Amino acid sequence: MQDAVRNHRQLRIVGHPTFLFSFTSDDFDIYHVNDFMRQRGWRFNGQQYPNALHMAVTRPQTQSGVAASFAEDLADAVAYANDHAGEAAKSGAIYGGVAGGMTNDADEFIRAVMADMLDAQSVIPPG
């Protein structure tokens, strides 16, 4: 399944995975791939930093023909993502995600909230 991802120049595997892997794209919104693959019965977890899709290869994915089906569906999903570039994806990150993926405004907001929280929790009580 990772080889299927590597066969697309517009996709990039994140890190050096084993049976769990994440992949992203620098060319289009990766969540479009998720939108399409969901229609074909595939389930990924959306991630951020960078926006990516995460998959755990478990026993059902090791059955005969599944990797080939994945490769075919992924090829169609990449074409779909290219055709919908510039449009908002329907899905996004689910782990502490920001709808539609990270933006500069969302990043600034998160940093401000975290700085305020750390300031409030790091105050030395008066002696």
Image (cartoon, helix red, strand yellow):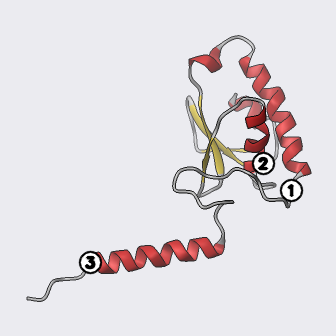
User: Up-down: is 119 above or below 52?
Assistant: below
Q: Residue at x 64, y 20 (%)?
A: 61
Position of residue 113 in the picture relative to residue 14 (left or right): left
Q: Residue furthest bottom?
A: 126
Q: Residue at x 48, y 79 (%)?
A: 112
Screen quadrant of the C terminus = bottom left
**Residue 74 figure quarter:** top right
Position of residue 65 in the picture relative to residue 53 (left or right): right
Secondary structure, mark 2, is helix
Position of residue 124 in the picture relative to residue 83 (left or right): left
Q: CA distance from mark 1 to mark 3?
A: 44 Å
Q: Residues within 10 Å of mark 1 (few under 14, many from 20)?
A: some
Q: Residue furthest right?
A: 83
Whichever of callouts 2 and 3 sits on the residue coming sooner in the sequence is 2
Q: Could you tell me the amino acid type at mark 3?
A: Ser
Secondary structure, mark 3, is loop
Q: Could you tell me the amino acid type at mark 1?
A: Ala
User: Where residue 86 appears, x then y in whole percent?
Assistant: 85, 61
* Near-viewer residue (111 or 25): 111
User: Where residue 88 appears, x then y in whole percent?
Assistant: 79, 59
Q: Could you tell me the amino acid type at mark 2?
A: His
Q: Residue at x 54, y 76 (%)?
A: 109
Say which residue label 3 marks: 122
Whichever of callouts 1 and 2 sits on the residue coming sooner in the sequence is 2
Q: Are marks 1 and 2 in contact (CB under 8 Å)?
A: yes
Q: CA distance from mark 1 to mark 2?
A: 8 Å
Q: Residue at x 34, y 75 (%)?
A: 118
Which label belongs to residue 74? none
Say which residue label 1 marks: 85
User: Where residue 120 appears, x then y in whole percent?
Assistant: 30, 79
Which label belongs to residue 32? 2
